[in-house]
Image (cartoon, grey):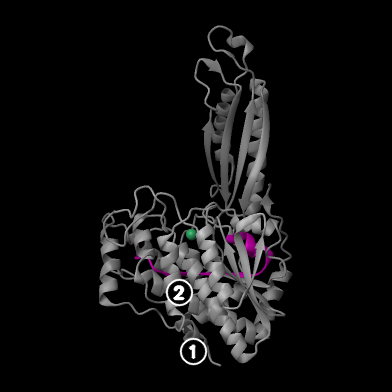
C-alpha cells in the first residue's frame, strides 16, 4: 500500500470528519464540562470498532484502542472550547449566543482530525494486517493546561511508545520544540481579625501579607531569567475595609521555557510568601495546583512528520472560501498581518498559508503559549505540527478564529491534518528502523517525569 492509499482512506472519511467538526462547534463546552463532546467521540470510535478505556476520576477523558503489539501510537485529540467566544460563521462580530463559549482555539478541528486519522488507520491496518496498536486519546481541559497532566497522574498514557499531536494555526509547520512550561500555585494567608479603627493593634492582616508578597515578587522579577513570566491575582475573601482581614489569598502562574526554571522560580516565590508572612505575623499555606511542561524536541520524529507533510496533498479551497478567509483578515486593524508574514517569510499580500514551512522555520516563530501536550513529550517521543486554517494576523482565542473553525475552511484544514497524522502513523508501522531510531533518541536523553498535580 502506498501513502496515497492511506490518504485515500482518510479522504473517504471526509463526511465523518466534517460532521464531527460541526457537532463539536455547535456544542461548545469549556474545560471540565466536555460531556457531550467526549461522548460523541467515544461513540464514533466505538462504532468504528475501537475498545474504549475510561478513567473513573476523569469523566471526560478516555482512550480508544485498536490493534495489538508494538509500537503503541498515541494520537492526541482535544475538544474543549473557550468562554465568551461564541461567534457565527460571518466576518463581523456576532455571537450565536451572547456570552456563550465558542471554539476560538479550533479544538473542534483538533479532536475531529485525530479521530478521523485513528479510524482510517484501523482500516489500513486491517487491510494490510499490520501489527501495532493505535490509540486515540480524548484529552479534556487543555485550555486549563491540566487535562493531560491529570491523565498522566492517573497513568492513562502508560504503555504508549510515541505520540502524534497537531494544532490549527496560521501555518503548515512542524514544531520541534515549543510552549512555555507553566505552573499554578495558591498562597493562603491567615491572620487575626479585628476592628480596623477601634483595635487595629490586635489585628494581623492577611491582606497586608498578600500585598507584601506581591511587592516582593515584583522585585524578584529583575532577578529571574528574562524569558520567564509571573502573573498573579489576589483575593481579599470578601472582607470590607473596616475589618482587619484574617484571610486573603494570592493565586500565581509562573511560565518559563523549561519546567526546571518554573520550579526554581516557584521555590523563590514561596520564600517571598514566607517572608511576607513573617513580616505580618500571619501564617501561609502553599498549594502548587498543577503545572505543565514545555514541549521537548524529538528531532528524528519531526523529520518524519516534515517529510509526510510535504508528501500530503494540500487542501483545495474554493474562490468563495478564500474570499471568506480574506474578509476575516480584513476585519483586523491595518498592519496586523505583517508580523506573521515576516515570521513565515511570505509575500506582503499573503492571506492563507498554502505551502509547508521549511523543516526548521519553527525556530524563528515566537511562541509564548503553553500546552499540556508538553507533558506527553516528557513521557514518550512526541511530534507536533500546525495546519493553517487562520489567515496571517488572525490569532487563536478570537471571534475571528471561532468563525473560521466553524467554516468549511476549518473542516478542510482538519482533513489535511488527518492525512498527515495517518501518514506519520503509517510510517511508524511500516518502517521499523525509523521508529527504532525515534525511540532510541528519546531513551538516550534519559528524561525524567513526574506529573505536577495534586488532587
Ligand atoms: Zn488550543
Residue 444, position in %: x, y?
Answer: 73, 70
> Element at badge 1?
helix
* Residue under numbered circle 1: 4
Q: Which mark is residue 287?
A: none
Q: Quadrant of residue 55?
A: bottom right
Q: Which residue is mark 2?
A: 17
Q: Nearer the viewer, residue 446 or 64?
A: 64
Residue 270 covered by magenta stretch: no
Q: Residue furthest top?
A: 198
Instruction: Calculate the distance from the C-alpha at mark 1 to the C-alpha at mark 2.
Output: 18 Å
Residue 390 magenta: yes
Residue occupying the point 51% across, 66% down = 40
State the residue in front, 187 or 180.
Answer: 187
Residue 146: give x, y in percent of width and height. Answer: 59, 53
Location of residue 93 (image quadrant)? bottom left
Q: Is residue 357 visible?
A: no
Q: As displayed, is residue 151 above or below residue 126? A: above
Q: Secondary structure at mark 2?
A: helix
Between disc 1 and disc 2, whose residue precedes? 1
Figure check: 423 above or below 398: below
Q: Is residue 427 left or right of residue 242?
A: right
Instruction: Give the residue displayed 43% in from the left and 50% down from the top.
Output: 83
Residue sitting at x 56%, y 93%: 1
**Residue 428 seen in the current view:** yes
The residue shown at (69%, 75%) is 439
Q: Position of residue 402 (x, y in %)?
A: 37, 59
Q: Nearer the viewer, residue 390 or 336?
A: 390
Query: Label 2 crowding class (10 Å Cα cut-off): few <14, some 14-19, many 20+?
Result: many
First to last magenta residue range = 373-392
The location of residue 135, given as percent across then percent down, is: 63, 73
Amino acid at each position: 500500500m502506498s501513502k496515497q492509499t492511506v490518504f485515500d482512506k482518510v479522504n473517504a472519511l471526509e463526511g465523518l470528519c466534517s460532521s464531527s467538526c460541526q457537532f463539536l462547534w455547535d456544542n461548545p463546552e469549556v474545560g471540565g464540562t466536555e460531556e457531550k463532546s467526549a461522548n460523541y467521540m467515544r461513540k464514533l470510535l466505538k462504532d468504528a470498532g475501537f475498545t474504549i478505556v475510561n478513567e473513573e476520576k476523569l469523566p471526560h477523558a478516555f482512550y480508544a484502542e485498536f490493534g495489538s503489539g508494538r509500537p503503541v501510537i498515541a494520537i492526541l485529540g482535544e475538544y474543549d472550547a473557550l468562554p465568551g467566544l461564541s461567534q457565527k460563521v460571518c466576518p463581523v462580530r456576532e455571537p450565536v449566543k451572547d456570552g456563550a463559549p465558542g471554539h476560538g482555539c479550533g479544538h473542534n478541528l483538533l479532536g475531529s482530525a485525530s479521530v478521523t486519522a485513528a479510524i482510517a488507520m484501523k482500516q489500513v491496518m486491517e487491510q494490510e494486517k499490520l501489527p501495532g496498536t493505535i490509540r486515540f486519546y480524548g484529552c479534556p481541559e487543555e485550555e486549563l493546561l491540566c487535562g493531560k497532566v491529570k491523565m498522566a497522574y492517573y497513568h492513562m498514557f502508560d504503555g504508549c511508545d510515541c505520540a502524534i499531536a497537531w494544532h490549527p494555526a496560521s501555518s503548515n509547520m512542524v514544531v520541534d520544540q515549543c510552549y512555555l512550561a507553566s505552573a499554578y500555585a495558591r498562597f493562603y494567608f491567615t491572620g487575626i481579625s479585628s476592628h480596623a479603627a477601634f483595635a487595629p493593634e490586635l489585628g494581623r492582616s492577611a491582606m497586608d501579607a498578600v500585598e507584601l508578597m506581591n511587592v516582593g515578587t515584583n522585585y524578584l522579577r529583575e532577578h529571574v531569567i528574562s524569558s520567564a513570566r509571573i502573573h498573579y491575582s489576589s483575593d481579599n475573601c470578601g472582607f470590607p475595609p473596616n475589618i482587619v482581614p484574617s484571610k486573603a489569598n494570592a493565586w500565581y502562574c509562573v511560565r518559563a521555557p523549561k519546567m526546571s526554571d518554573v520550579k526554581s522560580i516557584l521555590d523563590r516565590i514561596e520564600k517571598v510568601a514566607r517572608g511576607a508572612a513573617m513580616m505580618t505575623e500571619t501564617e501561609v499555606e502553599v498549594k502548587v495546583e498543577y503545572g505543565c511542561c514545555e514541549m521537548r524536541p524529538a528531532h528524528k520524529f519531526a523529520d518524519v512528520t516534515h517529510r509526510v507533510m510535504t508528501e500530503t496533498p494540500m487542501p483545495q479551497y474554493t474562490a468563495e472560501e478564500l474570499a471568506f478567509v480574506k474578509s476575516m483578515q480584513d476585519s483586523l486593524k491595518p498592519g496586523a498581518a505583517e508580523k506573521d508574514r515576516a515570521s513565515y517569510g511570505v509575500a506582503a499580500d499573503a492571506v492563507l498559508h498554502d505551502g509547508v514551512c521549511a523543516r526548521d522555520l519553527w525556530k524563528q516563530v515566537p511562541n509564548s503559549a503553553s500546552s499540556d501536550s508538553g507533558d506527553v513529550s516528557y513521557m514518550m517521543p512526541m511530534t507536533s505540527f500546525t495546519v493553517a486554517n487562520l489567515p496571517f494576523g488572525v490569532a487563536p482565542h478570537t471571534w475571528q478564529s471561532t468563525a473560521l473553525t466553524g467554516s468549511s475552511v476549518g473542516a478542510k484544514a482538519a482533513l489535511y491534518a488527518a492525512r498527515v497524522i495517518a501518514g506519520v502513523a503509517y510510517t511508524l508501522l511500516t518502517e521499523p528502523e525509523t521508529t527504532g531510531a525515534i525511540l532510541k533518541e528519546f531513551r538516550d536523553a534519559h528524561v525524567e517525569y513526574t506529573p505536577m498535580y495534586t488532587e
